[in-house]
Image (tube, rainbow, N blue to C red):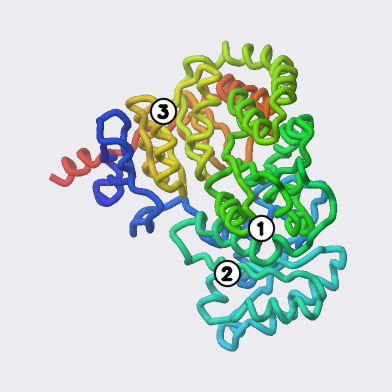
Amino acid sequence: MATRLKCNDTIPERDAHIIIKGDGTGCSIKSNSATTPGDMTERGCTYAGCRGVVGGPVKDAIQLSHGPIGCAFYSWGYRPHVADTDFHMKYTFVSDMDESNVVFGGEKKLLQSVIEAAAEFPDAKGVFVYNTCTAALIGDDGKDVAKMAQEEIGKPVVFFACEGFRGVSQSQGHHVGNETIFRNLVGSVEPEEDYAYSINILGDYNIKNDIKTFEPLFQALGLKIITRFTGNVSVDELKIMHKAKLNVIHCTRSATYIADMMKDKYGTPSISVTLWGIANMSKALRETAAFFGLEKEAERVIKTEVAKVQPKIDHFKKRLAGKKVIIYQGGPRAWHWPELLEELGMEVIGAATTFGHHDDYEKIYSKVGDGTLIMDNPNVPELEEILRTYKPDIFIAGNKEKYLAYKLGVPFLNGHTYETGPYAGFSGMVNFARDLDKALSAPVWKLVRDQARPSPVSTLDLEEDVA
């Protein structure tokens, strides 16, 4: 059932993007469509999804944006993709297109930028070139430049056609990133090692070192992890990821594309898992182990690890039980996390994503109770109205939304790049529960609520004043 927020009286098109579960019409929400003019969207662009999410975490590639300086600065270091080197986060590279390049073309400047960067950082294993709107609109042939640059420097130069205006959100950038890496790198090396018990972890970007919570668990089963796509991964590891016997997909919105391409070309099967939460992490280990006939090893690991964290989880559950939550995340976490919150005795009363597709919303719909508000691509006026109307005990969202929550006196948890983290795996669940408790228990909220600004004037009030 679509619903109308007061702030959307002038943009009725937004009604189709907001539903409440329980009216019998099913998950009829509109999603993955162009943003309505006049809607102050929170979305990022295709470039953001490719550079910021998929390609950016590769730790030993020169990350070079072909465009104005602003695009490079926007994408630099805003996601904590932890790795065993800080090269990808310490430096950013850009061709720095200016007005003269827009008039006369920027291809020569791009070629020079790649050659100079490679010479300055000879240990880098390759160069990733990301196209931006400016370069695409003037018709620069970055793909051809990348070929010339590759011959010049003797290393892979991978060109991503990820100009921001493509697609309707950053989700298109995930697709471009997957396809480009697969086409240019995967399968380019054929190692001779034994990979009989090997997997890839797809769709994990090592936010706040998430992999340290779950990689040892898979290794304890006797499995070798070849490639992480793309958290703490090297260019050389991407080249051999086709040798894995199984792809384990964590983020289905950003990494299913490469799993499907590997299935088509190499016959590599895949499973979709969730690596957040006790039940989900246990299920992921069991399903992965079953593929290799390692069920006994999985049960041993699960029993041992759960015993370590369960007392701590029980402690926080007593403090968190009954609290109401609204989740607003980029994509799959809005359907990954209701189960985590349920394990802690909490209730999700609203869930939204920035760039979710219909299958994401179907999963959200199946995991929340009747009366839950479900939204696609909410904007700030909508979020403010929802927080005032639904009055959640805590709001889980990203970096851009925290200040709104603070101003309204609503306890907030950063689910995008985490508060402290890591949040994945068994031990990460303890961190997640601890950070929720810290946010809810902070004494500052009583002081903030007492001084929070009053509700904005409603549409009805405005009409009465005009009359």
Looking at the rendered structure, the kind of residue marked 3 is Val
Q: Indicate which disc, 3 or 1, sits on the residue closer to the N terminus.
A: 1
> In the drawing, what numbered circle is on residue 55?
1
**Along the line of sight, which residue is nearer the eye, 235 or 377?**
235
Residue at which label 3 appears? 368
Q: Residue at x 43, y 39 (%)?
A: 352
Q: Would you identify the image quadrant in which residue 128 lies?
A: bottom right
Which residue is located at x 76 percent, y 59 percent? Answer: 235
Instruction: Name the kind of residue labelled 2 in the image.
Output: Ala
Dot 2 falls on a residue whose secondary structure is: loop
Task: Indicate the amino acid at tag 1.
Answer: Gly
Tag 3 or tag 2, which sits nearer the N-term? 2
Real-space Cα separation, disc 3 to disc 1, in angstroms: 33 Å
**Is residue 423 at least partly visible in the picture?**
no
On the rendered structure, is 2 left or right of 183? left
In the picture as drawn, the residue positioned furthest to the bottom comes out as 104
Disc 2 designates what residue? 161
123 to 146, vertically: above or below: above
Of 305 and 196, which appears nearest the observer? 196
Q: Secondary structure at mark 3?
A: loop
Quick one: 222 or 249, which is closer to the camera? 222
Quadrant in which residue 102 is drawn: bottom right
Measure the alpha-carbon separation of dots 2 and 3.
Answer: 37 Å
Q: Is residue 453 shown above or below 238?
A: above
